[in-house]
Image: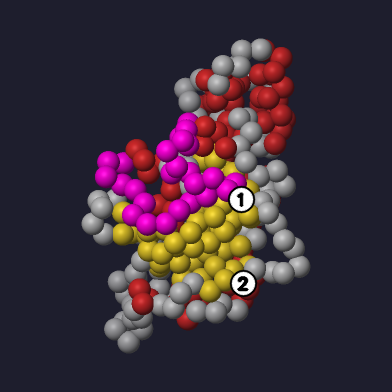
Amino acid sequence: MNDTMSATEHQDYSTAPQATTSNPPEIEHEVVIEIDDVNFSYDKKKDVLQDITLDLRKNEVTAFIGPSGCGKSTLLRCMNRMNDLIPNAGLTKGEIRILGTDIHAPEVDVIELRKHVGMVFQKYNPFPKSIYENVAYGLRIQGIKNKAILDEAVETSLISAGLWEEVKDRLDASGLGLSGGQQQRLCIARTIAVQPKIILMDEPCSALDPLSTATIEDLITKLKHDFTIAIVTHNMQQATRVSDKTAFFYLGELIEFSDTTKLFTNPSVKATEDYISGRFG
């Protein structure tokens, strides 16, 4: 919370009402991710996510907003079990189901899960390899060796990431030689090359200049026709530009989840109104 906030302005949003939801009835998309009453802890003592319930639907972009430390990136990493890499971290209650399957069921292969749930990180992280090999990497580790298949996948993925025309004549050049915005699009191409169903984006534009940010935002709008996307962003204007639904988090609680236009123009919870109007954050 902003340290400059006066005592009279302070609100105890940790006891805010249960999150409100408002899904537009005119379009019904298939539910792809079901997050059902989830609590999560890093140390098995204190839950940093508390009773989170929301659905993410096919071919929609869902934005997670809220102050730093509110749990939005933690929830994002829960969806492909990236938090498994942290000792003693895990769900203490609830379920996350992707396409109807509990992702914590004993029979679930985490590597297979991450093929279907790709992730784009805050800091672009291309491998120290050629542009071609960056995109082909995931396919190669799946055992695909046929050059024609790899060539087609690399080209298709770079086209989808809006990068093909810029790099098609230098596929053997290092991916590290690209600009920051191009490197982030290369990472997106690498993610979609293995044909996931879901793409998770953790502040994908925070390290980029405004022009590169606009390019990535345009790309997100196009990619949602083929993928379900969840994006964590601190930029509320970005959430309004790219997302269909927005979830507002505060102190580990889901305060409000609704159609993006409604949440930003007519929020149902005072905490949401205070946050988007800049009273805290």
Front residue (pair 67, 178): 67
Q: Position of residue 101 (x, y in %)?
A: 54, 45
Disc 2 residue crowd, few under 14, some 14–19, many 20+, Cα 10 Å: some
Which quadrant is home to the N terminus? bottom left
Which residue bears the numbered disc 1? 32
The residue indicated by pointer 2 is 22
Indicate whether residue 106 is drawn in magenta.
yes
Identify the residue at horizontal 68%, vertical 51% (top origin): 59
At horizontal 45% and vertical 53% (from top left) the residue drawn is: 95
Residue 132 position (above or below residue 224): above
Rounded to the nearest angstrom, the CA distance separating label 2 from label 1 is 18 Å
> Magenta span covers which residues?
86-111
Q: Position of residue 123 (x, y in %)?
A: 45, 41
Foreground disc of the pair 2, 1: 1
Whether residue 33 is visible to the viewer of this picture, yes or no, is yes
Q: Nearer the viewer, residue 240 or 213?
A: 240
Quadrant of the snapshot with the C terminus: bottom left
